[in-house]
Amino acid sequence: MATPVNVGMIGYGFMGRAHTNGYKRCPDFFPELDHQPVLKAACARSKDKIQAFADQWGYESIETDWRALIARDDIDAVDICVPNNLHKEIAIAAAEAGKMILCEKPLAMNTAEGEIMCQAVEKAGVANTVWYNYRRVPAVTLAKQVIESGALGRIFHYRANFLQDWTISEDLPQGGEALWRLDAEAAGSGVTGDLLAHCIDTAIWLNGTIADVTAMTETFIKERVHQATGEKTKVTIDDACSFLCHFSNGSLGLFESTRYARGHKAMNTFEINGSEMSLRWDLHDLHRLEVFDNKDEGALRGWKSVHVSDHGGEHPYMDKWWVPGLQIGYEHSFVHHVADFMKSLDEGNECGPTFRDALETQKVCDAVLNSAKAHSWENV
Ligand code: SOE
């Protein structure tokens, strides 16, 4: 009999579904783990909406006040799946109540908030993690293993982008349900905290810390109707952001994100170039890791595309799924995150990215935004 981890989910949007699917699949595909999630309660202000969510996904009960959820003795772990401006208050209260916390990215609105959140979980000694899910796409995890083996040699370059196109229409309102990502009051920033944060988390994980940055941002649509008031108000998020950086290992970084790249829905890529080998990954082909190995010889030397689908059981996570050659997708990265969190409870260690790890990404985001404002280089 597994040790239950009773989850209290706060939120019910796209991410609430993605995380819940992770909790549901974990016992089926990682049955060897001692700790296993139980969908204990879902929470949101709207009783009708959260009841419908709970019924659809199989949560045992509902709450309409997150404080009541956190106060419950039968909740072990709180999943924070609400707009960024609510993360800090909920995380501190959950930590003080001794709950484990799984927080949606980005950790906080800014570094100052994030630091307070780190102190809260560290003081309380509660298990914590932030849902930077792309680390757990098997091809990305494989890239980490290859880089750690030293096979790339000296690293010269790292480049990444995350491109979307869903905010090009001037008629799209800002604020409120589904559109809070366009409202700086709720989101803290635009593409920097929403999209680049993913790229930065992956970059730091693969290539180490970032020392300094210089950035530019643009807000293409200056005013939008706010859903809450119906009034046209100034847009203060960044619609696009690009930055250059130095990594602490001496390599150079180049990052771009936007919601104005017509045709791109979620183009999330990275490439890393070392003296001996380069690796390249693209979310739209997420099961493939492209590799150029300078040791290869002859006329057929070139980029090869490795289908990360359990060749001889060597590919991360893939032995948990189907048979070799059959690929998995986006949602599995969340199942893997849940499984790794449960495993960390079994083993008594941390599940990265912890709040402290995610604070590093937050620091880079802040430096990027400050640099864009000041037209300067900023240390992280
Ligand atoms: C924005 O459209 C978004 O949903 C992000 O908030 C997610 O973190 C990203 O994974 C996909 O795009």
Image: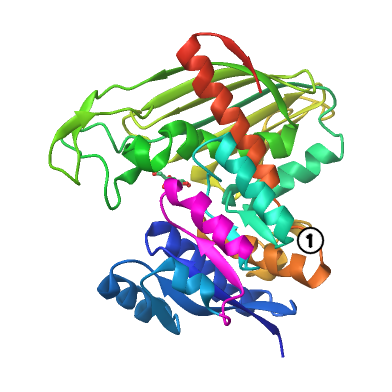
Given residues 249 and 188, the one toward you in this image is: 188
Residues 92 and 167: in front is: 92
Residue at (61% x, 28% y) in the render: 364
**Image quadrant where one finds the C terminus:** top right
User: Could you say which quadrant of the image residue 326 lies in?
Assistant: bottom right
Question: Where is residue 52 drawn, in percent x and y?
Answer: 30, 76
Residue in the foreground of this view, choosing between 32 and 285:
32
Label 1 Cα neighbours within 10 Å, binned few <14 / some 14-19 / many ≥20: few
Residue with the mark numbered 1: 312
* Residue 170 in view of the camera: no
In which quadrant will I find the N terminus? bottom right
Q: Position of residue 302 (x, y in %)?
A: 70, 28
Residue 270 spot, x, y in % from top left = 60, 33
Give the side of residue 174 with respect to residue 356, left or right.
Answer: left
Whether residue 235 is in magenta: the answer is no
Q: Quick one: SS at disc 1?
A: helix
User: Residue drawn at (63%, 79%), measured in percent from left and top?
Assistant: 27
Q: How many marks?
A: 1
Coloring basis for residues: rainbow
- The kind of residue tagged 1 is Gly
Does the image show residue 134? yes
Whole-percent x, y for residue 367 in the image: 58, 23
| Residue for point 79% across, 45% down | 145
Question: What span is colored magenta in the figure?
Answer: 73-96
Quarter residue 361 falls in: top right
Residue 318 higher or lower than 232, as above or below: below
